[in-house]
Image: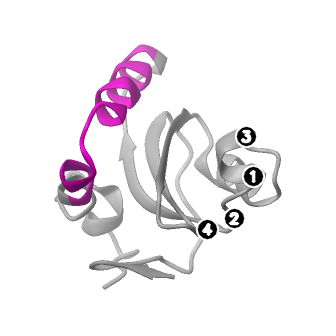
Amino acid sequence: MKTANFTAPEFTDFPAGHCVYMLLCADGTYYTGWTTDFNQRLAAHNSGKGAKYTRSRLPAAPAYLEYVPDRSAGLKREAAIKKLTRPQKDQLINSKENYLNRHEHRYD
């Protein structure tokens, strides 16, 4: 799956922990959420049981992942990301803040 400068990674083995994420949906839109187990949440989204928004936009691939210290930080960060414009979200996805860009899961 490719949109702009983004190619979705083909892996699903992410460390457990509080995290904020963005998914690239099949229609090219982003979905932003928060979880304590990204592997489980990603599987739920792609099985149609994750969120109403993603159900009609499958498959959804990881575009951004940021680990946070706790639930409170996660919810605040999720709200902040949801307020960003599309170009700002694209910048965030390509930034060093993105866990996917800092680890062996590099996708470009």
Circle 3 crowding by C-alpha within 10 Å: few under 14, some 14–19, many from 20: few
79 to 20, vertically: above or below: above
The magenta region covers 72-90
Does residue 97 appear anywhere in the picture?
yes
Say which residue appears at 51% left-offset and 82% top-offset: 1
Q: Kindly indicate whether the residue at mark 1 contacts the one at mark 3 (C-beta within 8 angstroms).
A: yes
SS class of the residue under badge 4? loop
SS class of the residue under badge 3? helix
Q: Nearer the viewer, residue 79 or 41?
A: 79
Give the residue pinned by disc 2.
58
Q: Earlier in the sequence, mark 2 or mark 4?
A: 4
Circle 2 crowding by C-alpha within 10 Å: few under 14, some 14–19, many from 20: some
The label on residue 12 is: 4
Say which residue appears at 82% left-offset and 58% top-offset: 47
SS class of the residue under badge 2? loop
The label on residue 55 is: 1
What separation in Å lies between label 2 and label 1 (alpha carbons)? 6 Å
Give the residue pinned by disc 3.
52
Q: Kindly indicate whether the residue at mark 3 contacts the one at mark 2 (C-beta within 8 angstroms).
A: no
- Which amino acid type is marked by label 1? Arg
Q: Nearer the viewer, residue 15 or 41?
A: 41
Task: List x then y, in percent, for residue 97.
Answer: 21, 51
- Which amino acid type is marked by label 3? Lys
Location of residue 93 by image quarter: bottom left
Say which residue appears at 52% left-offset and 37% top-offset: 33
Q: Is residue 83 magenta?
A: yes
Say which residue appears at 30% left-offset and 85% top-offset: 108
Q: Nearer the viewer, residue 48 or 67?
A: 48
Q: Kindly indicate whether the residue at mark 1 contacts the one at mark 2 (C-beta within 8 angstroms).
A: yes
Q: Is residue 28 left or right of residue 48?
A: left
SS class of the residue under badge 1? helix
